[in-house]
Image (tube, helix red, strand yellow):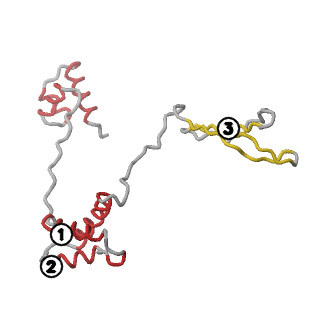
Amino acid sequence: MQRSKVELFAAIRRDSRVEGLSVRALARKYGVHRRTVREALTSAFPSPRKKQPPRKSRLDPFKPAIDAMLWADLDAPRKQRHTAKRIFDRLVAEHEMEGISYATVSGYVGWRRAEVRREAGREPAEVFISQTHRPGADAEVDFGEVAVRLRGVLVTCFLFTFQLSFSGKAVHRPIDRTNGVSSRVLTA
């Protein structure tokens, strides 16, 4: 069974405290380096991983030319805009690009085109709104009018709607406008 690094650190600290094992014995028992054992004994939580610096790409010298083409496409008619294939062909012909695949250029153009449109204000930025709700914490309430036929007569009623966001359970209560009497509760 694979255990997380936090669980490993907790086990090492527990065995050191309860059984009094040495650093070397703990390293042997858990199959880790002694440096990891010392880190676990000094801190309950492992240090975060170091971020690797971004790797250089063979496409880097050509990115300004691609960006210029994409920026020029913002004002061009739809049928005259550059496709990824056309950009690749222009880089080979005009900028003497060699040893870079079409897939690399196409991948960069695919996400960069959307970035350029956002930077120019032509597309709204993507926003993520979490759709998770804690039970009983959120609900939606609305009021409105609804026309219903009661005993052959068309009557306009107020409609109260209450829906729990977590479960989706809802309560709808129509109220007669003329006498304010609530009809029976309708649940969904």
Image quarter in which the N terminus is found: top left
- CA–CA distance between discs 3 and 1? 59 Å
Q: Name the residue: 56% across, 36% down.
A: 139
Q: What residue is rendered at 22% in x and 66% in y?
A: 67
Which one is earlier in the sequence, the residue at label 3 or at label 1? 1
Q: Residues within 10 Å of mark 3 (few under 14, many from 20)?
A: some
Q: Amino acid at mark 2?
A: Glu
Q: Earlier in the sequence, mark 1 or mark 2?
A: 1
The answer to which image quadrant residue 38 occupies is top left
Q: In the orientation shown, which residue stands out farthest toward the bottom?
A: 93
- Check residue 174 in the rendering and tell me which mark sits there, or answer none: none
Q: Disc 3 marks which residue?
A: 160
Q: Amino acid at mark 1?
A: Ala
Which class describes the residues within 10 Å of circle 1: few (<14), some (14-19), or many (20+)? some
Q: Secondary structure at mark 3?
A: strand
* Dots 1, 2 in contact, CB < 8 A: yes
Residue visible at 14% across and 73% down in the picture:
99
Quadrant location of the C terminus? top right
Of 72 and 36, which appears nearest the observer?
72
Q: Which residue is mark 2?
A: 94
Residue 50, percent from left and from top: 17, 42
- For label 2, count other residues whose C-alpha is less than 10 Å away and answer few (under 14), some (14-19) or many (20+): few
Badge 2 element:
helix
Q: Position of residue 183 (x, y in %)?
A: 78, 36
Residue type indicated by callout 3: Phe
> Where does the image place residue 179, in percent across and percent down from the top left?
81, 33
Is 99 rendered above or below residue 48? Answer: below
Task: Find numbered disc 1 in the image and state the secondary structure of the residue it sits on.
Answer: helix
In the picture of the structure, the residue carrying the numbered disc 1 is: 65
- The answer to whether the residue labelled 3 contacts the one labelled 2, judged by CB atoms less than 8 Å apart, is no
Q: Tell me the CA gap for discs 3 and 2.
A: 67 Å
